[in-house]
Image (cartoon, rainbow, N blue to C red):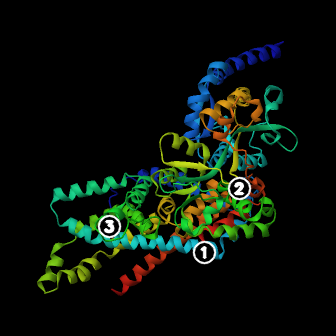
Amino acid sequence: MKGREATTPGWLGILPGTALVVLFLIPFGIMLAVSVAQRETGGFYQWGFDLSGYQRFLSAFFGGVLLTSVGIAAGTAAIAVALALPFTVILAGLSRRTQTAILVVLLSVLSLSEVIVGFSVSTLLSQTAGVGNILAWLGLTAEARAYTPSLFALMTGLTYLSFPYAVLVLYPPVARLDPELAQAARTMGASPLRTFFSVTMPLLRAPLLGALILVFVFALGSYLLPQVLGRPEHWTLSVHITDQAIYQSNLPFAAAMAAFLLLVALAMVGVALLLAREKGDRA
Amino acid sequence: MKRRTFLVTGAAGLSALAAPALLRAQGAPLKVGTYGGYFQDSFSQHIFPEFTAETGIEVESIGEPTGEAWLVQLEQAARANQAPADVSMMSQVSRLKGEAAQVWAPLDESKLTNLGNLPEHFVHRYEDGRLYGTGAVSWYITLVTNTEAYPEPPASWTALWDPANADKLGLLALASNSFLLEITAVTHFGGTDILGTEDGVMQVLAKLAEVKPNVRLWYRDEGQFQQALESGEIPMGQYYHDVTGLAASNGQPVRSTFPKEGAVLDSGSWVVSKASQMLDQAQIFIDYMARPEIQAKLSRNVGTAPTVDRTLTDLSDEEFAAVSSDLPPILPRYDLYVDRADWVNQKWSEMITG
């Protein structure tokens, strides 16, 4: 720090720092404390040190639920980022006005609540009012059928919700990309597709990873869409946490599951960052 | 002398300070929680205005989430000495859990002159005999169908197991609000006695698991199912008799059927949060709701079954038949969801998602 002029006064950090402690660390501490509280059957809980919530979680059943959640979140991250990357690269090549218009539309998607998106997708894929009727009218299927609830419906909803986040993460670095690099590759005879995969994508490795992690964590916490668009086997751990906290008033168990979910999220992010660093060293 | 003066001025000062608060408490409305949506709308329209006109007590209507969410909120708030609602309508499982956690304020029986109208199972007491709640309304969960998809009403709960109904059912997602264990036990095991042991519950669950291929939606949110039932997207399922009747009278192609095995008779009860500052007004309200004419009014306008004995009311046979049935009802085993709550819930989750 010495010899360098501070451009931001240090005390400005007090506000976000306090907010982090008050709004994140303290609730997180309370959650951990509740997760080991003693459950009273037929009642609520009392403070104590009881690991039965964690024990109950360590079962094949909840292991399966956890795998489902991670699988759905990872799938959403992969699909959303795979769609967002070419979208953003093409977007960055458009005129400034068009770019702004498209970004505004994307941002407005963020203002839609999960409930609205869930019900819209379920209507769109329903038997009585959905696309099945168009397919039947076109003669592609014998009669209209429902495509919800299903894994397809769930992934559609989750991708729809997380796509704008992926674009927003990718847009600044993509817009700053030096166009000459891609042009050089083209001059040297690389096809556009090859240029995209061997020049553009490696340059964007860090933001791509960032987008993947953001969407993964975002999708990992989803609980409404799996209920509206998924079948019971697609219910994520968040759905089970809600059931325990809201419907069974078993807050210790819900908190223990939430702690597990957080650990898994942190572990996955950690592994992703480690992998990225190793690759970066070798490159 | 000096000390006495101090005491007097002190007391005067205190009462002066306390007076505005008291006045505010008197002027404050009594917050009454009922299930948000249909119940809340019906109570606001048919019950609260006349109650206020008669007693002078203003009512603020609070919409509660169903299930145990409200219990959790009341309990958390009571720890901070807050009452999001003074009086709440609670499901029986939530009521019993709240009893175990002593969340409900004890009531003064001498203030409840209509207590005698209620049958014993609608007079709720702590183990030491203190009264804390009364039956509010009861309702049936029946077999419902879309009339366009099913021109003939189904006669029995066995329709849930019929392979012809593959992917057509909407059922409640939780053991403790669907009462599907009781329905299965009565339909296939001759009664709910089998649910007395864990072995028996497992047998019933195994039988219930056979309906899974028929279930399109395991719903937690009523609105989600009702909309799908009305559109015919999910043409059969279990639902509330009162709301289905209302939808049908509004021209929706839906019907509610009492299966020959009986429909599930569930109920809600009035309880007062121990954090409430308006116990007197709350008791007046609870007593008012136990009047036979008010119960009859609920039956006529809301479609709920009366909690008081039918003979006390002036309901005609026809009016009674619209909200109830002479068939013996399936009575929920609330003990299962209180004493064995975690175990039943775990096995239930494994059955549905497994």
Q: Nearer the viewer, residue B49 or A283?
A: B49
Q: Chain under label 2?
A: B
Count of number-bearing discs = 3
Question: Where's residue A121, x and y in %?
Answer: 40, 59
Q: Amino acid at mark 2?
A: Glu
Question: Where's residue B145, x and y in %?
Answer: 54, 54
Residue assigned mark 3: A135
**Residue A49: assigned label:** none
List the single residue furthest toward the left.
A187
Query: Which quadrant holds residue A182?
Result: bottom left
Residue assigned mark 2: B261
Q: Amino acid at mark 1?
A: Gly
- For residue B335, say whether it is visible: yes
- For residue B273, say whether it is visible: no
Residue assigned mark 1: A63
Secondary element type, mark 2: loop
Secondary element type, mark 1: helix
Q: Quadrant of the C terminus of chain A?
A: bottom left
| Label 3 crowd bin: few (<14), some (14–19), many (20+), radius 10 Å | some
Q: Is residue A111 left or right of residue B43?
A: left
Whether residue B205 is situated above or below residue B41 in the rendered picture: below
